Image: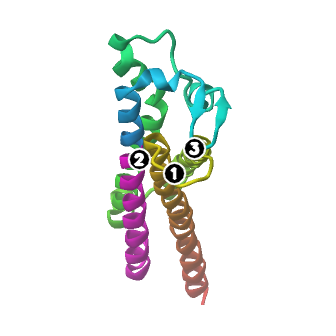
Amino acid sequence: MLHNTGMKIGMAVVLFFVFAGWVVALGGTAHATNECREESDAWLLPNNNPATDAQGPNPNINNHLQPFPTPNNDEDQTYNCGIHFSLDWWIIAFQFYMIIVAYLGVFVEFFHTKQTIGDFYAIATVLFTIYTSIYVKLGYEFSAGEHDDNAVAQGYKTAASGGIIVCVCNYVFMYLWGSEEGASEGGASAENKA
């Protein structure tokens, strides 16, 4: 049984915000990937940030979802950056798939499988929470919490802000998705007994 019209509209609005956050995360990840492809050697060198005088290991090497592959040479830049960001792109693709499935589940009875969509949405939310956590951390590590012109940090911060929107809206959607049907079934059974 589909949700009532008001709940459908509410879930559609929340899914719109999920999609908007997803677009922001997509743009931030694309920016970070592009920065890697343009200058992947800098991603392997020690972190020499002149804005913070911080020196030490580069946070991209081991603090990302996927470690940076080695050895690195100019011919392999695109491949290495693709490997480095591959899990990020799979998480983004899975979230897009879940947005489509959720819209279908809200409006089409055939796709309204409450348990399956709820379970897969929970997986997508956990994955996006991990993605967002990593991007927030790397955004701070590349800019030391300052707003500067570090292009890599800007990409990470953009992706993290989109990820935060996606995570919050995913939690709201899961609450709305699972909330009403149980209450309406209880009310229907009470009416049938009377």
Mark 1 near mark 3, Cβ–Cβ under 8 Å?
A: no
Q: Residue at x 62, y 47 (%)?
A: 144
Instruction: Give the number of the mark in front: 3 or 2.
Output: 3
Real-space Cα separation, disc 3 to disc 2, in angstroms: 22 Å
Instruction: Give the number of the mark in front: 1 or 3.
Output: 3
Mark 1 near mark 2, Cβ–Cβ under 8 Å?
A: yes
Which circle's residue, 3 or 2, is located before the other in the chain? 2
Q: Main secondary structure of the magenta part?
A: helix
Q: Nearer the viewer, residue 88 or 98?
A: 88
- Above or below residue 69? Residue 157 is below
**Callout 3, which amino acid?**
Ala
Badge 3 is on which residue?
A: 51
71 sits left or right of 22 in the view? right
Q: Position of residue 111 (x, y in %)?
A: 37, 56
User: What residue span does the magenta drawing correspond to?
Assistant: 1-28
Q: Position of residue 184 (x, y in %)?
A: 54, 78
Q: Quadrant of residue 36?
A: top left
Q: Residue at x 37, y 80 (%)?
A: 5
**Callout 2, which amino acid?**
Gly
Badge number at residue 160: 1
Residue 20 is one of the magenta-drawn residues: yes
* Callout count: 3
Assign the C terminus to one quadrant of the image: bottom right
Q: Residue at x 39, y 26 (%)?
A: 39
Secondary structure beneath dot 2 equals helix
